[in-house]
Image: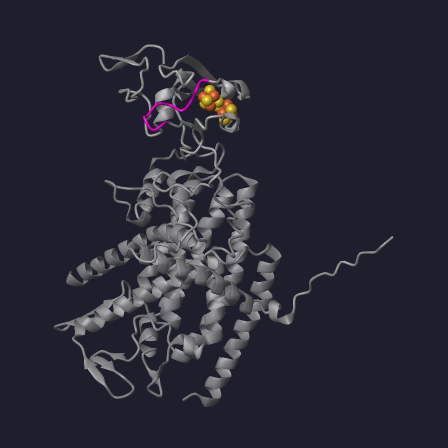
């Protein structure tokens, strides 16, 4: 059986004196202190902004840089004429492990395009952000690159996104105005959304 | 009558100055630790959208402290439990009366000492008050009817008494050299220069005493690395059973003692309100140049110099606090009795022999 000799670290006399090591420690903290103090002051004057004085991100005002492959809130991509790319093939709805996508397809007026989504809902309260829907889509019609992370709501119903929000990431609930240029069935009456979206 | 009014103004000035500095300490503590650790620190408290780098946090803190429920556990000794925090703050505050924060100011034939109370044995008085401060701590531990609090109080007492000895002996050297216990005289004596170039400050003539004093003073104020009495993160301190502003007062007393010690270190070792080469009538540089100054500029420069030195010491204590880990209790006692105590005694002996053989 091999014997492992554990060598205890004995302090040298220099270390036992303690004072030099304290000074060493003070040197480290002071170096950080003065460097950061200088940078903070410079930032106040609008200088040296590229050097960070602290590792803190002041969250609501300043968000962390996201990785390129980061999966954030979904969006539906659009064609050049502003209509959704989605052809209503139901692949994403089928593959979704959380079963949180609801698509109702309708006949597209253009005979070259088979169908279009009359209704496209994602329940973010259920979604697990796996990204399968993005992987599976044959039309590159759904992506998760909006960079929106702060999805929050006061009720489960408000966690559901409809096609308006999906096509227009800047749009947050409640949807007051339907700006889609497609022949869709969104009806506005007295400023209220009616109908089946 | 006018004398009384002047003393009152001075007392109010010192009182508010010190209390504000203590409140600023909470800000300093947060911000300095943050800057050292590459963070930003508390900066969210705002008034009308103004944040001023978190300067409103001390305000928010005190409001919180006052609004909190004051819980007094069942079965405590109510009188002592109530008295303990007041003891702590009181003894921490009264010491400041003897600190001279500026040179004397002459208007007509009236001489105003920038010092609340001119006590001949000011040094002894301050040390007495510092020692009495331990009563607040031990009473808090004793009156809480909590074994952990009592143990915390005992730790604090043992530590403060041990380090007070080193602290006192370290100062004997300074007192011997300048030959006075009157703090103002002591500061005035430090105005001399060595060969015209080096100011004869305490730190120059008693460097060993300075180091011992700083270490013992840190222990005396119960700050990290000597914060065994509180040990906020793991061992329970003497003020577990305190809440609301009573707890806040212990906190305040801690900061006050830190400032007190900073003032003492400034007065004893950094020449108090002395500015190098500044005489009452202006600057006399060793290379012969002179800059004449009016009396009020001279006095103001002195006060500014004193304040800056105190703030620098506060900064240094804070820097030490965020650099070093806490001692173990036996290490603490060993450092006090086998380290600082003999060193300070030897320092006194050496100083005494040097004075006896080469002194005037
Ligand atoms: S990310 Fe995953 S869970 Fe969410 S909608 Fe897409 S497939 Fe469904
Ligand atoms: S997989 Fe793509 S094209 Fe098919 S329904 Fe989903 S989003 Fe539309």
Q: Quadrant of the C terminus of chain B?
A: bottom left
Residue pictured at 43% horizontal, 26% vertical:
A141
State which quadrant residue A197 falls in. Answer: top left
Percent position of residue B353, x then y? 50, 84
Residue at the right extreme, as displayed? A1
Report whether B62 appears left or right of B329: left
The residue positioned 51% from the left and 44% from the top of the image is B142
Residue A87 colored magenta? yes
Going 51% across and 76% down the picture, which residue do you hit? B347
The answer to which of B11 and A101 lies nearer the viewer is A101
Residue A24 on the magenta span: no
Task: Determine the residue located farthest toward the front in the rendered image.
Answer: A112
Residue B75: x and y in percent read 50, 33
First to last magenta residue range: A79-88
Of all residues, the one furthest to the top in this rendering is A195
Q: Quadrant of the N terminus of chain B?
A: bottom left
- Residue B318's place in the image compared with A23, above or below, is above
Q: Is residue B323 left or right of residue B27?
A: right
Residue B210, horizontal then vertical, whole percent:
45, 71
Q: Main secondary structure of the magenta part?
A: loop
Front residue of this view, candidates B287 and A102: A102
Pick out the residue farthest to the left: B108
Q: What's the residue at 54%, 68% (across, down)?
A: A19
């Amino acid at each position: 059986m091999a014997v492992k000799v554990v060598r205890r670290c004995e302090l040298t006399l220099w270390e036992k004196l303690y004072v030099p090591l304290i000074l060493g420690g003070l040197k480290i903290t002071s170096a950080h202190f003065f460097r950061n103090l200088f940078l903070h002051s410079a930032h106040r004057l609008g200088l040296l902004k590229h050097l960070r004085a602290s590792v803190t991100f002041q969250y609501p005002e300043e968000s962390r840089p996201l990785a390129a492959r980061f999966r954030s809130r979904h969006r539906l991509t659009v064609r050049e004429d502003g209509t959704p790319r989605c052809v209503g093939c139901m692949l994403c709805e089928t593959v979704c492990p959380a079963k949180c996508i609801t698509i109702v397809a309708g006949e597209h007026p253009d005979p070259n395009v088979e169908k279009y989504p009359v209704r496209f809902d994602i329940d973010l309260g259920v979604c697990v952000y796996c990204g399968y829907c993005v992987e599976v889509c044959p039309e590159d019609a759904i992506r998760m690159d909006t960079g929106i992370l702060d999805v929050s709501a006061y009720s489960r119903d408000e966690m559901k996104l409809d096609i308006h929000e999906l096509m227009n990431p800047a749009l947050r609930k409640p949807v007051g105005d339907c700006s889609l240029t497609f022949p869709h069935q969104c009806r506005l009456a007295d400023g209220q959304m009616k109908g089946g979206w | 009558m006018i004398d009384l009014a002047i003393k009152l103004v001075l007392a109010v000035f010192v009182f508010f100055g010190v209390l504000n500095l203590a409140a600023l300490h909470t800000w300093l503590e947060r911000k300095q630790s943050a800057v050292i650790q590459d963070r930003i620190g508390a900066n969210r408290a705002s008034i009308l959208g103004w944040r001023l780098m978190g300067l409103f946090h001390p305000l928010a803190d005190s409001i919180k402290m006052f609004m909190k429920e004051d819980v007094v556990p069942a079965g405590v000794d109510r009188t002592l439990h109530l008295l303990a925090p007041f003891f702590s703050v009181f003894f921490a505050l009264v010491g400041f009366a003897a600190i001279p924060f500026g040179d004397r100011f002459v208007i007509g034939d009236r001489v105003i000492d920038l010092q609340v109370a001119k006590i001949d044995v000011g040094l002894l008085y301050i040390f007495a008050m510092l020692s009495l401060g331990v009563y607040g701590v031990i009473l808090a531990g004793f009156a809480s009817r909590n074994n952990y609090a009592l143990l915390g109080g005992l730790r604090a007492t043992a530590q403060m008494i041990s380090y007070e000895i080193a602290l006192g002996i370290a100062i004997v050297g300074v007192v011997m050299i300048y030959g006075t216990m009157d703090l103002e005289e002591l500061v005035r004596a430090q105005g001399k220069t060595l060969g015209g170039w080096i100011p004869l400050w305490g730190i120059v003539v008693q460097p060993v005493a300075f180091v011992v004093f700083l270490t013992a003073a840190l222990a005396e104020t119960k700050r990290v690395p000597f914060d065994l009495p509180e040990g906020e993160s793991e061992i329970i301190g003497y003020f577990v059973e305190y809440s609301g502003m009573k707890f806040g007062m212990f906190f305040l007393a801690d900061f006050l003692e830190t400032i007190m010690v900073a003032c003492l270190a400034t007065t004893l070792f950094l020449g108090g309100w002395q500015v190098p080469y500044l005489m009452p009538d202006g600057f006399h540089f060793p290379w012969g140049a002179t800059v004449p100054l009016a009396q009020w500029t001279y006095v103001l420069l002195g006060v500014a110099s004193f304040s800056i030195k105190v703030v620098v010491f506060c900064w240094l204590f804070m820097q030490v606090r965020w650099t070093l880990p806490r001692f173990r209790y036996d290490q603490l006692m060993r450092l006090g009795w086998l380290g600082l105590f003999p060193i300070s005694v030897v320092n006194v002996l050496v100083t005494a022999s040097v004075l006896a053989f080469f002194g005037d």
